[in-house]
Structures are given as structure tokens and as C-alpha cells.
Amino acid sequence: MKIIKNKSLKTFFEYSLKHKWLMLGVIILSTVTSLAAALPAWLSKYLIDDVFIAKNRKMMVLIIGAIGITTIIKVVSGYYANITSSYVTETIKKDIRVDVFKHLQYLPLSYFKKNKLGDLMSRLSGDTSILGQIGFIMFDMGKEAIAVLALTFRMFQVDYVLALISLVVLPLIISTVRKYTKKIRESGRVRQDTMGEVVAFIQESLSGISIIKAFNRSEVMIHKYKQLSQDEFEKSYRSRKISAKVSPINEVIATFMILLVALYGAYNIVTSKMSAGDLVSFLTAVGLMQQPLKRLIQKNNSLQEALPSADRVIEIMELALEQEYHGEVKTFSGKAETIEFKNVSFKYENKKEKALDDINLKVKRGEVIALIGQSGSGKTTMVNLIPRFYEIEEGTILVNNIDIRNYALKEYRNYIGIVPQETILFSGTVAENLRFGKENVTDEQVIEAAKMANAYDFIMEMEKGFDTEVGERGTLISGGQKQRLAIARALIQDPEIMILDEATSALDSESEKLVQEALEKLMKNRTTFVIAHRLSTIVDADKIVVMKQGKILEVGTHEELIKKDGAYKGLYTIQFGDKNNLKEKE
Ligand SMILES: Nc1ncnc2c1ncn2[C@@H]1O[C@H](COP(=O)(O)OP(=O)(O)OP(=O)(O)O)[C@@H](O)[C@H]1O
Ligand SMILES: [Mg+2]
């Protein structure tokens, strides 16, 4: 009863309901297999009493025939039960894996900032496999349980006193199994979490391999990995040790039971209360029961080990998704005439201080808004609120005077393009990366965008041009080139609102110029928020927003803010030199 409450099993049952007819098939086939396997407990009585003792020839033929036929039935139905249950469990495993991936895709961004990638990966790959195994284990347990029940029935049929004597030990067996079940499950959970840590560590150290090499820290990493592995080893070994105890204990109990039965049985035969066939039949039943019972216990151990692992998968499924919209849903017209931050304050979950404090800003369509300010002043946080990466609790962001929380998220985000500080390329060709899942984009449009982004020439210089495979993280492409690819990608998407996180990394003046030109084209005909580090972007912006510690200090054009002689001018002088220098640039 306790088991059913487990969420993994519940999920497994829910998924298996989609295949109820196949499940029924598995149940029937397994029942047939188990009964066929239990049949010798009946046949043996007749074999002894009628064939060996009474020497009945007809019976001999019948029994030998029956043994042959049941063997065939057992083998055939066993085979089909096996492949059908494999089919069902593999299908369920696949379905769950796809659903978990789907769920992950729609989780709020904060979840991914909080959790290690490697741990998520180990949950999605390793732990879903184990979740699939639960299926096999359950089917097997069902099969063994039927055999055990049939044989128990046979024991009572032969002699209920004898059966009761042998079953006295059963509660003992059950109580040991129970006692260890909980322990096995707990240690399994600990082990699986440690495994997640190990995978996360591998993931981090491989993706950071160039830094590790540059800092010459390979040995430190190896040492850390050794420690983690040792920890994992200890937990695995502990968990194995606990489950290993169950079988020997039960075997001792079972042997004790056989001794009792043999004693009482022999006494009954000697006093002629029982035929030899009956006793053999009873002992056959007891004998036949040993294996299924043992397997039942072993399978239970494996199940208890697998459940925590499976729980780690289900936990993901239970996390709240991004809320599609709040209140009454509104359709986004596709044109953002105004974008307004109204008294917006924002705090990250795990932080005490506000990352944004009472932000007010109104922007008109087509404007370029340059955000500047010290590191940590809240620039990225502010632009991340526009696509609703994080939900705000204080204040509102309005687009066309409608709270953005009222727009259907998937639709609304279609109109927002982002060129992040660090470009992420996915495995696939250059063209695929530029299209990025947008299917109705023609080759001409891709080429056009690449040309506008000043990326065309270097793409054509690559071995296979637009069909060149990009390595996992675009290893063969330089920083400036990646940026231009990101710009081309955004141009293809043609978003209404553009968010640009300018890379701080200094490019050589040639690529700098190419990137700058590309950016200028990208900013045309849309509203652009740019976290700016380049002088030209800042000077040309329609609004410069100066931020400090989550607050907006000043807003205005370059001329206005220089005239004002406030924070902007200070920053400007520090960053781009003195006034004379400035005049030259202008
Ligand atoms: N995911 C996060 N979780 C918790 N705190 C965060 C998170 N991201 C940023 N912060 C904090 O919020 C504040 C503002 O950070 P933000 O990234 O917006 O600054 P920024 O102006 O973009 O800085 P930079 O110029 O260095 O990119 C900082 O104090 C930062 O530590
Ligand atoms: Mg930032």
C-alpha cells in the first residue's frame, strides 16, 4: 500500500493507462507463464501416485504430454510477455523523457540560474532510464507474485496444516523486507543526488577546459573529481550493502521453514496420513516457490533503489511552469507604440537587496535606448524584465498601455529579439543557426541577413559556406564573427523590440567597425534597448539611461546630459577620456 503513494509509481501508472490494452496483454501473458511454471506442483502428485506407485501407463503418457505442452506454453507466453512489457516500458520511458524535456523548456529562467546543468542532465538521461526500469521491475514482480500465489494455493490444497506451518515464517520474511525497504530507498536517494553532483562537475570542468588549462588547474580538478567519486563510491557501496543483507536473512528463514515441513511431512507419511505423491507435490510447490520469492525480494530491492532516482525526474515535472498570462488575456498588436516601466522594483529570490528600485521610463516606438552604468547596477536585469524572463512583484511594465503580464507569453516573445553578450550557437550548420527554427525563411533571406550583418564574407570563406557545421559552442568562429552571426539571426527574426547586450570584449578596429555597422542596421525600424559600451552607440542613442545601484539617475540625449553636468558626464569622462577627446569624436 505504501508503494502506491510514491509519486514515481503514480506517474508510471498514469502513463501506462495510455497503453491499457497492451498492459492487459502483458498481465494475461504473465499470468499464463506463471501458472504454467507452477503446474509441476500439481503434476508431481500424479506422477508419483499414479505413474511411479500405481504404474498407470495412460497416466504416464498424459503427464509427460502435459509437461511438454506446459513447457511450450510457458516459453512462448513468457517470450511474448517479455517483449510486450519491453515495448510498453520503453514507450513510457520515451514519453516521460519527452515530457520532462518539454517541461524544462517552459520552466522559468530562474530555475536554470539556480540549478546545475549537469544535475539536470543526469536527471533527464540517467534517471529517466531508471524510471523506465521501474516498468520492467513491476511487471516481473507481478509475474513472480502470481507464481507465489498459485503455489501457496497448491500448498493449502495438499495439506493446510502443513501449509500453515510453512507460512508461519512468511511474516518474518515480510518484516525483514519492510525494515530494509525504507533504508534502501533513502540510501538510493542520497546516492543518486551524489551522482548528479558528479555529472554536474564533469559538465562544468569539460565546458571550462580551456580556463582550467590556462590556469594550469588540471590537477586540482582531478583531485576534486577523485573526492567526489570517492564520496559517490561510499554512498553506492552503502546502499548495496543494505540491500545485500536482505537475501541471506530471508534464505536462512526459508531453510528453517523447509526443515519444519520435512519433519511434519515425514511424520505424516510414516503414520500414513498422507500419500507420497502429496508430500512430493507439496515439496515441489515449496521448492518452486523459492526462486520466485527470492526474485520478488530482489526485485523489491531494485525497485526501492530505482524509486528515488525516478523521483528526481518527477520532481522536475512538479515544478511550476512560467505563467502564460495573468488575468484577462490580451492580444499583442505586433507594434509596440510605447513601452513603459512604471514604479518597477525587482528583487532576485536569493538576494536581500533590490536589483531594481522604483524604475520609471517611457519609450516610444523606433527609439534607441542606451543603458549605461557600473557593473551590477541592474542593466541586464532591467532588459530581462521586458521578455518576462522574471516576474516582477512591484510596479508594472506596459506595452501599448497594457500590462505585459496580460499578453500571452509565447506570442508576445515572438516580437522580441535578443542579441546576448555572449553568442550561443547550436550544433548544426551556419544556415540552421541563422534560421534558428524559423521555417518560413528563404535562403535568399538568410543570405540577405548575413550580408546586412557583415557576416556574408567570412561565412563564404568557410569550407562549406552556409552549410558549414558549427561545433558545439562554435569553437572555430571568432568572437566578432559570432556576434555578427547573432546579429544576422536577430535580423532574420525581425523583432519589434530588440534587446542588445553589447559585448565588452575589445574587438580589433576592423571587426569593431563591421560589428558597429551591422548593429546600426539592426537598430533601424524597431525599438532597441542596448546595454552600451561603445561610444558611438551611446552618443547616437535617443535616450541614454544612466543607472546606479538599481536606480535610474538620469535620462536624456547625449547633449542634454553633457549640459546637465551630472552623473553621465562623470561616467563619460572616466570611460571615454576628457572633453577635448570628446569633441574630436563628435
Ligand atoms: N540570477 C541572479 N540571481 C541573483 N542575483 C542576481 C542575478 N543576476 C544578477 N543579480 C544581481 O543583481 C544585481 C544587478 O545585476 P545586473 O546583472 O542587472 O547588473 P548589470 O548592470 O547588468 O552589470 P554588468 O554591467 O556587470 O553586466 C547585481 O547585484 C547582481 O549581483
Ligand atoms: Mg549585465
Image: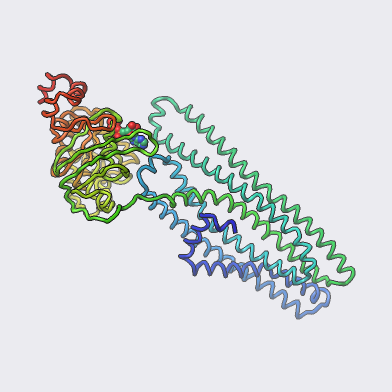
Dividing the image into 4 quarters, which one contains the N terminus? bottom right
At 38% from the left and 53% from the top, the residue drawn is 102
Q: Position of residue 291 (x, y in %)?
A: 69, 59
Residue 421 in view of the camera: no
Q: How is the image coloured?
A: rainbow
Q: Nearer the viewer, residue 214 or 233?
A: 233
Q: Nearer the viewer, residue 196 or 202?
A: 196
Q: Quadrant of residue 562?
A: top left
Q: Position of residue 160 (x, y in %)?
A: 77, 69
Q: Nearer the viewer, residue 58 or 112?
A: 112
Dividing the image into 4 quarters, which one contains the C terminus? top left
At 75% from the left and 76% from the top, the residue drawn is 60
Residue 281 against residue 557 in the figure, above or below: below
Q: Residue furthest right?
A: 271
Total marks shown come to 0
Locate residue 556 relative to residue 482 in the image: left or right: left
Q: Nearer the viewer, residue 385 or 292?
A: 385
Residue 104 in view of the camera: yes
Locate residue 159 relative to residue 81 in the image: left or right: right
Q: Position of residue 516 (x, y in %)?
A: 17, 34
Residue 470 against residue 320 in the figure, above or below: above
Q: Position of residue 456 (x, y in %)?
A: 19, 41
